[in-house]
Image (tube, rainbow, N blue to C red):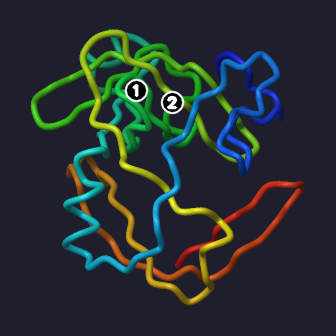
Amino acid sequence: RMAPNDDDRHYWPTASGSSSNSEGSGPLMPANVSSKKLSPEQIFGWAGESVYVIYSAESAAAIRKKTGISQGAAVAISEKEALTNCHVVENRNLIFLRKGKLFSRATLKFAHKKTDRCMLKIAEGKLQSIGGIRDFSDLVVGETVYAIGSPRGLENTLSKGLISGLREFDGIDLIQTS
């Protein structure tokens, strides 16, 4: 089960920042931010609070047996919505976001399988939204980039890489990193 809207329609913002979903129900992304260089410590301090651990499973029985549980990370784009990779939540009926000892139940709101991006929504509680994103046109091959994730549930792990390619495929801008 992939969830609502799992075809190749594009439910993400256009360059103007408005949703390209004709029904107007696509997520609004955070505003673009400047390309001012930040240290790794500044990046982690600025973005780390917006990154959540995700746990997903097919059923409560799978959780009790500790089998078939997927784990990944998501970034909050609003107080109620977070983006993650679809392969983390695909075919999963139970999805939880965790920050420290706090857990929030989430549901799949949108899926764009072609780009492996899914949007989750929480019903209760409040997420710490990311302050903004950089525009694709501002990125440069060779630029140092950082990722904050949760490998094996190790919350907020910072890693460093490079933009190794900026590509367009089938009308979709892709950022290749190493």
Three-letter residue code for mark 1: Ser
Three-letter residue code for mark 2: Val
Q: Which residue is drawn at 40% across and 43% down?
A: 75
Percent coordinates x, y for residue 120 in the rendering: 48, 25
Number of numbered discs visible in the structure rendering: 2
Q: Residue at x 51, y 48 (%)?
A: 31
Percent coordinates x, y for residue 135 in the rendering: 60, 62
**What crowding class fits label 2: few (fewer than 14 Cα within 10 Å), some (14-19), or many (20 or more)?**
many
Q: Residue at x 52, y 79 (%)?
A: 178
Please determine whether, in this image, residue 155 is positioned above or below residue 165: above
Please determine whether, in this image, residue 136 is positioned above or below residue 162: above
Q: Which residue is drawn at 33% across and 55% down?
A: 149
Percent coordinates x, y for residue 92 in the rendering: 50, 21
The reply to whether the C-beta atoms of the residues labelled 2 and 1 are less than 8 Å apart is yes
Percent coordinates x, y for residue 55 in the rendering: 34, 31
Viewed as shown, does residue 139 lie left or right of 144? right
Residue located farthest toward the right when viewing the structure as drawn:
170
Residue at image mark 1: 56
Residue located farthest toward the bottom when viewing the structure as drawn:
142
Residue 1 visible, this orientation: no
| Separation of marks 2 and 1 at Cα, in angstroms | 6 Å
Viewer-proximal residue, 107 or 41?
A: 41
Please tell me which of labels 2 and 1 falls first in the chain: 1
Give the quarter of the figure containing the N terminus.
Answer: top right
